[in-house]
Image (cartoon, grey):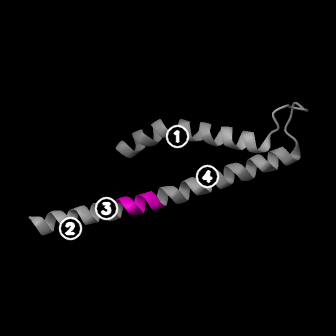
C-alpha cells in the first residue's frame, strides 16, 4: 500500500519533469503555428517513449537492488542472531 501512495505522490512530478524536458527539446520557444508540426509531434512522441522506457528500466533496477539489500539485511540478522 505504501508503494501506491508513494507513486501517487511522485507521478505528477515525474510527468511535469518529462513534459518540461520534452517540450524544451522538441518545441521552439517562439511558436509559428497554433498546432504542432509533424516534426515536433514525432519528436515529442519519441521523447516521451524514451523517458518512459528509461523510467521503467530504472524502476526495475531499483527494485532489484532493494530486494538484494533486503536479502543481505535478512542474512545479516540471521547470522548475528
Apparent side of residue 39 relative to residue 8 in the rendered image (left or right): right
Find the distance from the CA under tag 2 to the CA under tag 4: 35 Å
Q: Which of the two labelled residues, at mark 3 and mark 4, occupies the earlier sequence position?
A: 4
Question: Is the residue under label 1 in contact with that under label 3 (CB below 8 Å)?
Answer: no
Q: Which of the two labelled residues, at mark 3 and mark 2, occupies the earlier sequence position?
A: 3
Relative vertical location of residue 42 with respect to residue 9 in this rendering, above or below = below
Neighbor class of circle 2 (other Cα within 10 Å; few <14, some 14-19, many 20+) is few
Apparent side of residue 28 relative to residue 16 in the rendered image (left or right): right
Q: Which of the two labelled residues, at mark 4 and mark 1, occupies the earlier sequence position?
A: 1
At which x and y percent is residue 73? Answer: 23, 61
> For mark 3, what is the residue?
69
Q: Quadrant of the C terminus?
A: bottom left
> For mark 1, what is the residue?
11
Q: Quadrant of the N terminus?
A: top left
64 inside magenta stretch:
yes
At which x and y percent is residue 45? Answer: 74, 49
Apparent side of residue 51 relative to residue 35 in the rendered image (left or right): left
> For mark 4, what is the residue?
52
Q: Indicate which label's residue lies in the foreground, 2 or 1.
A: 2
At which x and y percent is residue 71? Answer: 27, 65
Q: Main secondary structure of the magenta part?
A: helix
Find the distance from the CA under tag 3 to the CA under tag 2: 10 Å
Neighbor class of circle 3 (other Cα within 10 Å; few <14, some 14-19, many 20+) is few
Nearest the viewer among 1 and 26 is 26
Find the distance from the CA under tag 4 to the CA under tag 1: 12 Å
Label 2 secondary element? helix
Relative vertical location of residue 7 with respect to residue 46 in this rendering, above or below = above
70 inside magenta stretch:
no
Q: Which of the two labelled residues, at mark 3 and mark 1, occupies the earlier sequence position?
A: 1
Neighbor class of circle 4 (other Cα within 10 Å; few <14, some 14-19, many 20+) is some
- Extreme-left residue of the structure: 81
- The magenta segment: 61-66
Amino acid at each position: 500500500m505504501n508503494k501506491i501512495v508513494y507513486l501517487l505522490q511522485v507521478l505528477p512530478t515525474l510527468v511535469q519533469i518529462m513534459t518540461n524536458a520534452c517540450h524544451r527539446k522538441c518545441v521552439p520557444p517562439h511558436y509559428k503555428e497554433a498546432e504542432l508540426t509533424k516534426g515536433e509531434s514525432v519528436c515529442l512522441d519519441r521523447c516521451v517513449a524514451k523517458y518512459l522506457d528509461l523510467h521503467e528500466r530504472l524502476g526495475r533496477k531499483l527494485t532489484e537492488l532493494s530486494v538484494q539489500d533486503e536479502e543481505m539485511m535478512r542474512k545479516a540478522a540471521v547470522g548475528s542472531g
